[in-house]
Each structure stands twice: as structure tokens, then as C-alpha cells.
Image (spheres, rainbow, N blue to C red):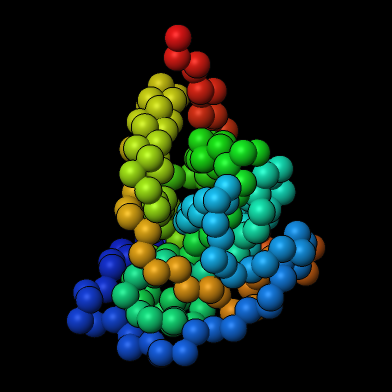
Amino acid sequence: MFKRLKEVVMPSRDSVLPGRSKKIPVSAKHYVLDTPMEGPFNAPYETAVFGLGCFWGAEKQFWQLPGVYTTAVGYAAGSTPNPSYEEVCSGRTAHNEVVLVVFDTTKISYRVLLKVFWESHNPTQGMRQGGDHGTQYRSGIYTYTEEQATQAKATQAEFQKVLTDTGLPTITTEVLPATQFYYAEDYHQQYLAKNPGGYCGLGGVGACLPEETTKQ
């Protein structure tokens, strides 16, 4: 018998968990890329943050790209300072499971990252991704510059047209200015490299973001 999923709602700011003042420690070096896990990251490097479901598989999508300098998984777009994984999963921090991507702007563009983002998950499902259900699995793009915000919204419109033309529903992705990124516990970092047979619920809808056209 089909079981109806309980509606997921964001907690109000005055009801979130208190968190803690001390940040969660992580390894100094990326397990795969052997690059620093924490910044500062200066030019030509730029930072991007994406939420596209369980962050284990999402991170792997990005660390494999030529021009990506480092990646990390963590929590963003919520209210609880330095939350734990268990707290985020409780739905009482308002955080999303996200991937931080630091990329070399001379080797890869932000649009390429957006293309991977849109094509690697289903951005129409609200507070879930496949069988993963909760506030931490929502689709989100968290921008650091006006240019990132412009490109995120432009590609959303482009991808929506593709989805609409193929009979798929409306995108629910949130596009917001980036707030504090909190690193997840070290065992989550580069999880699928450390655990090759680990769970990965990532999957797209079979649609592609159109290639960027060169303006004359």
C-alpha cells in the first residue's frame, strides 16, 4: 500500500536548535585531490556552493571536474551555528546538505558547474531527492557574487524550458546569497572515495542544459 510522505516544513528561526560555538574539525588535505580543505582561497580561485540531495554523491560529481581545486561537504542556508549531522537530519536547523566547490576560473567556468548541478539531480521535488526526504535534501544554489546569481537564475530559466518541453514539473530550486558554510564531520568528506561501495542516491532526469551560445 502506498504510504503518503509527511509534509516537510522549514523550522521557524526561533525554534531551531542552538548549535555550538566550536566548529567541526576536518582534515587539512582533500582525500582525493591533496589540496587544502579550508581557505582562504584567492584569485584565480572562486567558491561555489550547491545543494542537490545527499552530499556524498554530489561532492564526487564536482571533484572529478578538471579545473576544480578542492571540494568539501557541509551545511548551509540554515540558522543553527556549527550543526552536527544528526542535528541537520532532525530538520530542526534549517540547513541543507551542500557541496562547497573551489574552482580555478582560468580552467573552468561557473556555467560548467551549473550544468553539472542541473543535470545531476531532480530539481523539481521540493524537500526531497528521490528516496531521501527532509529539509536537508532540497535543491539549492548559494551564490557569492552578483554574476553567480545572474548565471544561476538564467540557467534555471533555460533548464525549466527543457523540463517543460518534456512534460516535467516546475523547478523548486532555491537561489539565495550564500551565508555561512559549516564543514560536515570529517568522515563525510570525500565519502565515496573512502567508501567506494557507499550509498549514492544522486540521479538526474535525463535532461540537459543547453550549451552556452557565443554572442556576436
Quarter assignment of residue 87: bottom left
Q: List x then y, in percent, for residue 99.
A: 54, 59
Reply above or below: 169 against 138.
above
Q: In the orientation shown, which residue stands out farthest toward the top?
A: 216
Q: Which residue is at a point 22% across and 74% down the rendered structure image?
A: 12
Quarter assignment of residue 91: bottom left
Tag count in the figure?
0
Nearer-the-camera pick, 96 or 62: 62
Left or right of 8? Residue 34 is: right
Q: Which residue is at a point 61% across and 46% down the rendered structure image?
A: 104
Reply above or below: 210 against 14.
above
Q: Which residue is at a point 65% across and 38% down the rendered structure image?
A: 107
Q: Is residue 1 visible?
A: no
Left or right of 16? Residue 160 is: right
Quarter assignment of residue 11: bottom left
Q: List x then y, in percent, for residue 118.
A: 50, 40
Q: Which residue is at a point 48% across and 65% down the rendered structure image?
A: 97
